[in-house]
Image (cartoon, grey):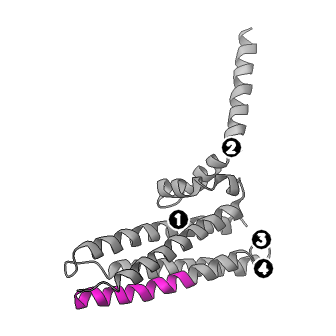
Amino acid sequence: MTNFSILLLLVLCALQSCFAASNPSNFIKSSCSTTQYPALCVESLSVYAAAIRQDPHQLVQTALSLALNRTESTKTFVAKCNKFRGLKPREYAALKDCAEEISDSVDRLSRSLKELKLCKVNGQDFAWHISNVETWVSSALTDESTCGDGFAGKALSGKIKDSIRGRMVNVAQVTSNALSLINQYAAKH
């Protein structure tokens, strides 16, 4: 009877492991575990677990779409801030530079999303397209960091600085996670 109990326990554990591995939320957690911001990755992508399922391409596409949406939202916010009255010359210059950087980032992420749709097949074409995606997302991340850097230091202070930097940190983290997931996807194909 003891051998039967042990065998039954092993079978139940194996079944539980198989079920856990087939769970879309676990797929997202596992994929996000290697990103620089795993908690944010899981939190932001879990909402889309039903659409992502266990599809690595869909995971990457969703992460990239999320990065693009957050960047577009931040671009709109920066444009509104630029219209505030009473901005100091340094604040206005930083906002103007940031608006340009964020616009470039939106462009690169949009192009990356279109290029990613061409990556559904393996082979030389896959390598070319995914390389473009990696390059453009990396460039978008640099643009986002540059925008945030424009609000560093003590020359700027106040609500605009805090609001922009907070949004830029979030956008850069989401984009960094997307790039990490893209790199994982590329390495497996």
Q: Tag 1 or tag 4, which sits nearer the N-term?
A: 4
* Relative image position of residue 87 (x, y in whole percent): 25, 86
Kindly report the distance in space between the C-alpha atoms of the residues bearing marks 2 and 4: 31 Å
Does the residue at mark 2 contact the one at mark 4 (Cβ under 8 Å)?
A: no
Residue position marked by numbered label 3 in the rendering: 120
Q: Marks 4 and 3: which is nearer the front?
A: 3
First in sequence, mark 1 or 3: give its number. Answer: 3
Tell me the element at label 3: loop
Closer-to-camera residue (45/173): 45
Q: Which residue is mark 4?
A: 124
Q: Is residue 68 magenta?
A: no
For label 1, the residue is 177
Q: Which sits earlier in the primary sequence, circle 2 or circle 1?
A: 2
Of the image marks 3 and 2, the number of the one nearer the N terminus:
2
Residue most extreme to the left: 154
- Residue visible at 68% across and 57% down? 52
> Residue tagged by mark 2?
21
Residue 109 lies, in percent from the top left, at 58, 78
Relative to residue 155, is residue 54 depicted above or below? above
Callout 1: 10 Å neighbours few (<14), some, many (20+)?
many
Q: Is residue 119 left or right of residue 89?
A: right
Bounds of the magenta span?
88-107
Camera-side residue of 157 and 1: 157
Above or below, 81 relative to 173: below
Residue 179 sits in quarter: bottom right
